[in-house]
Amino acid sequence: MMQTLEGAEGLVSGGRLRAAINLGNAALAVRDPATGALSGVTVAIAQELAARLGAELEFVPYSGAGQVTGSASDDVWDIAFLAIDPGRTSVVSYTPPYVLIETTAAVRDGSALRTIEEIDQPGMRLLVAEGSAYDLHLSKVARHVELIRAASPPASFERFFAGEADAVGGVRQSLEQACAGKAGYRILPGAFTQVRQAMAVPVRHQAAIPALSAFIEALKRDGFIRKALDTAGRGDLPVAPPENE
């Protein structure tokens, strides 16, 4: 049975649903360099939601999660896909998570670092994307490592490859993509944290959250999320468990 979206109709304006897509997280969305087409699990979810609302879908791409959150009050997007973080609830409201991802770090082959836990030591410098889930997490728990903030994940990777800092943090799949074809780098085992990724709306649309939450739960139950991840080549990512489990 198709789940009702009563209560989410207010997200549509002028027949359009505007979906913010974070291209800084390669686990969730990518752009084809030849055609410019967007794909990935967040793209698939946005397309399904627009179809059920009978709306024309408009993508609003961003290079980092911090930029998505930073524009939440600007009325430039209606839905987004963000890591759940209590520090963002003043500007966005979340559904339950739909997928779980790991954040880790890449280092140069000559680095003495062998595990993710070894990064938090005096004198260590780690590049992170400002406002990302791992930046927010490390800002709370890291005791010794110096966090160097870049404007977006791609910017942090570029600065690391240019020789800045001892390591660069990121979503594992984004780090793998950034390091692919480059000699002299490796990704550390382990993870800073497991990130719960959810659909989000600006707080002015928080009345839509019950309907959107039911929508996300239905997509988890009926296999839509699993199929979208597999189609995108992300079979390694686990679907978040149902909220009632």
Image (cartoon, rainbow, N blue to C red):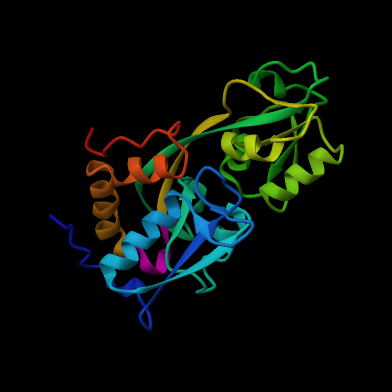
Q: 63 above or below 241?
A: below
Q: Nearer the viewer, residue 136 or 127?
A: 127
Picture quadrant where residue 170 is located:
top right
Residue 204 within the segment the image draws in magenta: yes
The residue drawn where x is 26% and y is 54% is 215
The residue drawn where x is 73% and y is 35% is 181
Using the rendered image of the protein, determine whether residue 89 is visible from the camera's viewpoint: no
Q: In which quarter of the image is the N terminus?
A: bottom left
Q: In the displayed structure, does residue 167 sit left or right of residue 141?
A: right
Picture quadrant where residue 62 is located:
bottom right
Q: Position of residue 96 (x, y in %)?
A: 34, 46
- Report the residue that reaches farthest toward the front: 34
Q: Where is residue 176 in the image (x, y as percent from the top left)?
A: 63, 34
Q: Where is residue 220 in the image (x, y as percent from the top left)?
A: 28, 43
The residue drawn where x is 53% and y is 30% is 193
Using the rendered image of the protein, determine whether residue 152 is visible from the camera's viewpoint: yes
- Report the residue that reaches farthest toward the left: 1
Q: Is the magenta stretch mostly helix, strand or loop?
A: helix
Q: 102 above or below 42?
A: above
- Report the residue that reaches farthest toward the right: 163
The residue drawn where x is 30% and y is 64% is 208
Q: Magenta segment range?
A: 200-207
Picture quadrant where residue 22 is located:
bottom right
Q: Quadrant of the C terminus?
A: top left
Q: In the displayed structure, does residue 117 sit left or right of residue 9?
A: right
Q: Nearer the viewer, residue 25 or 143?
A: 25
Q: In the displayed structure, does residue 190 sit left or right of residue 95?
A: right
Q: 67 above or below 157?
A: below
Residue 1 within the segment the image draws in magenta: no
- Report the residue that reaches farthest toward the bottom: 14
